[in-house]
Amino acid sequence: MTVFANHWQDAVVASSGTVSAAVNLGKDYEYINVIVPTCDSTTLALQVSKDGTTYYTLGISAATAATTGNLATTLEVGGYQWIKIVCGSTQTAERTFSVRGYRG
C-alpha cells in the first residue's frame, strides 16, 4: 500500500540561488514527488538531513539530467524527513518546486 504525505509543500530556490529552503516532510519517506517549475537549464539534486540541522548531499541516484523544468518527477530520498532541492546552476528568478513524500 502506498502512503503519501498529507499535503504538498513548497521548496523555494531564491533568485540568484541554487539551494532551496529546508522542507520538513513530516516523517521519513522513501521517495518524493517533485513538480519542477519552468527554470533556467539545470540539473536537480537533493540535500538530506536526519535532524533538520546538518544537511548532506544525497548520492548520484537522486540527481536528474539537465532540464528547463515544467515537468514532474520522482526522486529517491532513502528514508529522510528533511530535504532541500539543489539546482546545478544559479537561477535568474525565484523558483518554487512543489514536493511531497511517499512510501512505496
Image: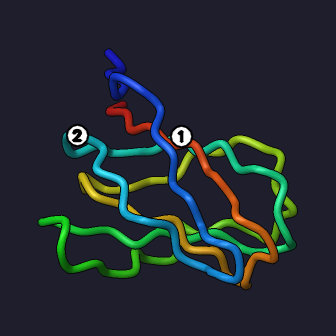
Compared with 29, 61 (above or below) is: below
- Looking at the image, residue 101 sits to the left or right of residue 42; the answer is left
Compared with 100, 18 (above or below) is: below
Compared with 66, 76 (above or below) is: above
- Looking at the image, residue 43 sits to the left or right of residue 28; the answer is right
- At label 1, the amino acid type is Asn
Q: Which residue is mark 2?
A: 26
Q: Which residue is mark 1?
A: 33
- Foreground of the two, 64 or 70: 70
Q: Earlier in the sequence, mark 1 or mark 2?
A: 2
Circle 1 residues within 10 Å: few <14, some 14–19, many ≥20? some
Q: Quadrant of residue 29?
A: top left
Looking at the picture, how far across and down is residue 90, in whole percent?
A: 72, 84
- Foreground of the two, 12 or 71: 12
Q: Secondary structure at mark 1?
A: strand
- Looking at the image, residue 62 sits to the left or right of residue 68; the answer is left
- At label 2, the amino acid type is Gly
Compared with 100, 54 (above or below) is: below
- Looking at the image, residue 91 sits to the left or right of residue 31; the answer is right
Q: Residue at x 40, y 72 (%)?
A: 47
Looking at the picture, how far across and down is residue 63, in whole percent?
A: 59, 69
Q: Residue at x 52, y 65 (%)?
A: 85
Q: Residue at x 53, y 40 (%)?
A: 33
Quadrant housing the C terminus = top left
Q: Residue at x 32, y 22 (%)?
A: 3
User: Do residues under tags 1 and 2 come within 8 Å of each other at their CB atoms?
Assistant: no
**How is colour applied across the structure in the image?**
rainbow
Which mark, by number, is residue 44? none
Distance, label 1 to label 2, CA atoms, is: 15 Å
